Image (tube, grey):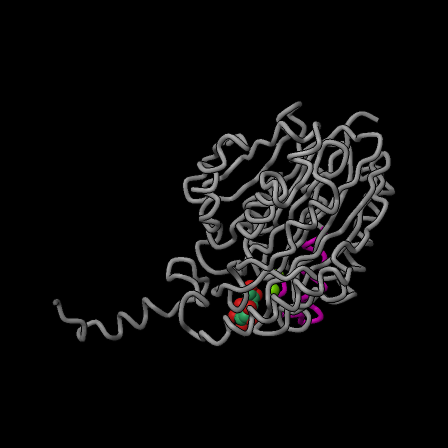
Amino acid sequence: MDKVTISVIKADIGGYVGHSSSHPDILKRAEDNLIQARDKGLLIDFKVMRCGDDLELIMTHEKGEDSSAIHKLAWDTFIDCTELAKKMKLYGAGQDILSDAFSGNVKGMGPGVAEMEIEERKSEPIIVFMADKTSPGAWNFPIYKIFADPFNTAGLVIDPSLHGGFKFEVLDIYKQETVIFSAPEEIYDLLVFIGAKEHYIIRRVWRKSDGAIASVSSTQKLALIAGKYVGKDDPVLIVRSQSGFPAVGEVLEGFAFPYMVAGWMRGSHHGPFMPVSFRDANPTRFDGPPRVIGAGFQLSNGKLIGPRDMFDDPSFDHTRRMADEIADYMRRHGPFEPHRLPLGDMEYTTLPEVRKKLEGRFKKE
Ligand code: F6R
Ligand code: MG
Ligand code: MG
């Protein structure tokens, strides 16, 4: 086989209960759709998963990135599942379906997309990370740790096949411009931007020695697409590992610190990013804290051997405990920053209305 494409396309098409999780009947319906596509030969393989209230379609095929056939399959599947969600009166049915008509590509229509076309290696371990109750900027920190920080990834220092470093493509989501940085030489420049994670998002990473793609994230910002709040983006990320890429353990180590991400309740709060097992991906406390799961696969001629539940490991218990402590600490700030997001980043606000109501009461100093 020549090249294989991994497409991860996701959408929140309805929650059970509230925004906390997904109903098994919805997953079953999505699976039925994708089985048909596989039987017709459109897909090589697929896995239907969920993280919180997000329906995740992990698909392999030979159609390349941005294939309208694959995007249409995902779109039609989301529409079909939305119909069922509406029938069941699941919460926020069709939440991420922002358009009525499909026009060849799901980008900009609500769903999140991460795709990579690769030449499958002799052995191809990949990890698909899926998050709920946060935005795509949530990946900046772990991607930096994994591909640029020698205190995280020992291979950057001691493995000749990683020692050359990686290139980072950063997207300015407000200007819709991209810029590429080379690490390690330009890490200070890179960090100036990616530290502002709600503005600059790492989209792709390549290995410098041969230009091989190493990771791809989804970068849709639903709030910007819709011009109003329609739910946090709840992003996905695909990472290749081993033999010239960071080892599986170096990739996972990037999530060992529960750093602060934007999202959580009403997409308007900072909270710790908590790595959990598949079964624990149900944000409940204050609709959170934000969760991430890691689904590990060995690709075998495009077949997805897996998933392995990568955070289902007691060595992440401490991270989770720390996340709970941070959650407590942050919650006690109530409506104050930095728990509540800065005014411009909140997905919900009453500010314009309240300001208008009080118009005559503001006096010039
Ligand atoms: C955050 C999220 C939830 C909702 C919250 C209020 O991404 O999905 O925290 O914002 O449950 O939801 P509504 O406005 O639907 O009642
Ligand atoms: Mg939802
Ligand atoms: Mg969600």
Majority secondary structure of magenta residues: helix
Left or right of 211: which side holds 124?
right
Q: Which x, y percent locates residue 98?
A: 55, 54
Which image quarter: residue 346?
A: bottom left
Disc tally is 0
Q: Nearer the viewer, residue 287 or 274?
A: 274
Residue name at image x 86 percent, y 45 percent: 305
Position of residue 204 relative to residue 210, above or below, is below
Q: Residue furthest top?
A: 210
Q: Which x, y percent locates residue 269?
A: 48, 65
Position of residue 338 relative to residue 249, above or below, is below
- In the rendered image, the quadrant that contains the C terminus is bottom left
Query: Range of the magenta residues?
Result: 77-93
Which image quarter: residue 216?
A: top right
Which image quarter: residue 113?
A: top right
**Residue 280 on the magenta span:** no
Residue 94 appearing in the image: no
Position of residue 16 relative to residue 174, above or below, is below
Ligand 1 shown in quarter = bottom right
Q: Nearer the viewer, residue 262 or 115?
A: 262
- In the rendered image, the quadrant that contains the N terminus is top right
Residue 362 appearing in the image: yes
Q: Which x, y percent locates residue 285?
A: 60, 74
Q: Residue furthest left?
A: 365
Residue name at image x 44 percent, y 48 percent: 196
Q: Nearer the viewer, residue 128 or 40?
A: 128
Left or right of 313: which side holds 150?
left
Residue name at image x 64 percent, y 42 percent: 114
**Residue 80 on the magenta span:** yes
Residue name at image x 45 percent, y 75 percent: 334
Q: Which x, y percent locates residue 246?
A: 70, 39
